[in-house]
Image (cartoon, helix red, strand yellow):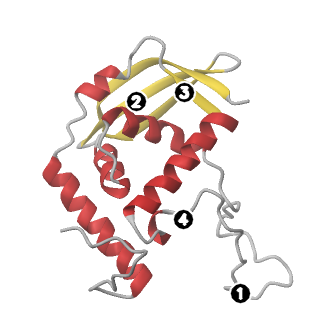
Amino acid sequence: MADEHTIIDILAGEISPGVQGWSVITLRPGSIRWQHTFPAETMEWRAAEYGLTDPVEIVDVILHEPYQETDAPVLPPSVKQPPGKAAGATVAKAKDPHGPILLEATSTRAARDAHRSRIAAVKKQRVRITDPDGLLAHIHRSHGMDPDRVRAKREAVDVHRWNRLYGGLPVPVTDTSEVPRA
């Protein structure tokens, strides 16, 4: 059963010099207040990366992303390689039951479906963020996403992903790949 985190306040404005954004303050179990701050531009990036169009879904994704499970602990640079492992050796990771991550997906649809699955798992198993007073409506209404900026970001994400997958453009189109977007 997921912990419930209730939104109790939202702050908007400059979150660092020259960067506009929001802080969403939640109340966690045990009366612990938690602040999740993100740049406004994050909404455009999620729209571009996953082909999302609904500001309500985009904000929901952003708020639940930090609670995703990671497949391996991140070790600080000072930690030495475990004994028996050659320097630079990689450990084979288990197949993600949700599907490919953004830069491993062969299409935006595959990345979106997998990311939605991960977020659904977070809400079911770890954390569910609730907004009983409708405070997120302010962000939903005044998100400031610009279609031209989203398109430019989408193109950058697509080119980067396809370069990683296929080694360069043009992308070989197969029955399983998406036709490149312009």
Image x and y of residue 129, in percent: 54, 27
Q: Nearer the viewer, residue 76 or 99?
A: 99
Secondary element at image label 4? loop
**Which amino acid type is shown beneath numbered disc 2?**
Ser
**Mark 2 or mark 3: which comes first in sequence?**
2
> The C terminus lies in which quarter of the figure?
bottom left
Which mark is in front, 1 or 4? Answer: 4
Residue type at tag 3: Ile
Mark 4 crowd level (few <14, some 14–19, many ≥20, 10 Å Cα): some
Q: Which residue is mark 4?
A: 100
- Label at residue 87: 1
Q: Nearer the viewer, mark 2 or mark 4?
A: 4
Mark 3 or mark 1: whose residue is earlier in sequence: 1
* Amino acid identity at mark 1: Ala
Foreground tag (4 vs 3) = 4
* Residue drawn where x is 13% and y is 53% of the image: 148
What element does badge 1 sit on? loop
Q: Quick one: SS at disc 2?
A: strand
Q: Which amino acid type corresponds to the residue marked 4 in the rendered image?
A: Pro
Query: Residue 23 shows which numbered tag?
Result: 2
Spatial CA distance of label 1 from label 4 is 27 Å
Numbered label attached to residue 129: 3
C-alpha gap between disc 4 and disc 3: 25 Å
Depth check: give the residue in front, 95 or 136: 95
Can you give x and y, in whole percent of width and height, for residue 164 in the image? 42, 80
Q: Cα distance, mark 2 to mark 3?
A: 14 Å
> Which residue occupies 66% across, 62% down?
74
Q: Which mark's residue is nearer the viewer, 3 or 1?
A: 3
User: From what the image shows, is residue 63 above or below residue 83?
Assistant: above
Most distant residue in the top direction: 133
- 71 relative to 169, above or below: above
